[in-house]
Structure formats: structure tokens, C-alpha cells
Amino acid sequence: MPFGGFKQSGIGREGGVEGLAPFLETKTILLDGMPSQI
């Protein structure tokens, strides 16, 4: 994931992972009866 860029390209240096956090969610699935996070 790019963190830099020139002018209006990329997500900029301020965006980063914190900028994506509102769009992400954690899901739990079961594999062989054991909980795992994806």
C-alpha cells in the first residue's frame, strides 16, 4: 500500500492504515472447530 506520492496521486502520507480503519471489519471463522481471525 503506498504511503507517499506526488501531488494528487496515492493516498498521501497522512492516510495510511488509520485512514482505512473505518472501512475494515474483523470476521471470525471456524477451521476444524478452532476459532481463527481473518
Image (cartoon, helix red, strand yellow):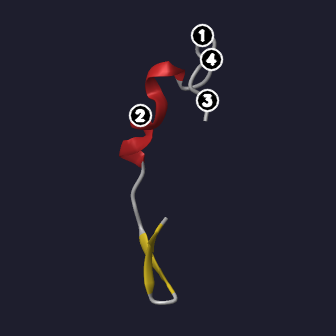
Instruction: Give the mark nearer the N terminus: 3 vs 1.
Output: 3
Of labels 3 and 2, earlier in sequence is: 3
Q: Indicate which disc, 2 or 1, sits on the residue closer to the N terminus.
A: 1
Label 4–label 1 contact, CB within 8 A? yes
Q: Are marks 3 and 4 in contact (CB under 8 Å)?
A: yes
Q: CA distance from mark 2 to mark 1?
A: 18 Å
Q: Say which amino acid is labelled 3.
A: Pro
Residue beneath disc 3: 2
Residue 20 versus residue 31 in the image, above or below? above
- Residue 38 in the image: state x and y as whole percent: 49, 65
Q: CA distance from mark 4 to mark 2?
A: 16 Å
Depth check, front residue: 37 or 22: 37
Q: Where is residue 1, by image quadrant?
A: top right
- Reading the image, the residue beneath label 1 is 7
Q: What type is the residue that disc 2 sits on?
A: Gly
Residue closest to the far front: 34
Circle 4 sits on which residue? 5
Image coords of residue 7 (percent x, y): 60, 10
> Which of 16 and 23 lies nearest the eye of the viewer?
16
Give the answer, above or below, for where 11 lies relative to 36. above
**At x 45% / y 37%, what residue is drawn?**
17
Query: 30 above or below 27?
Result: below
Residue designated by label 2: 19
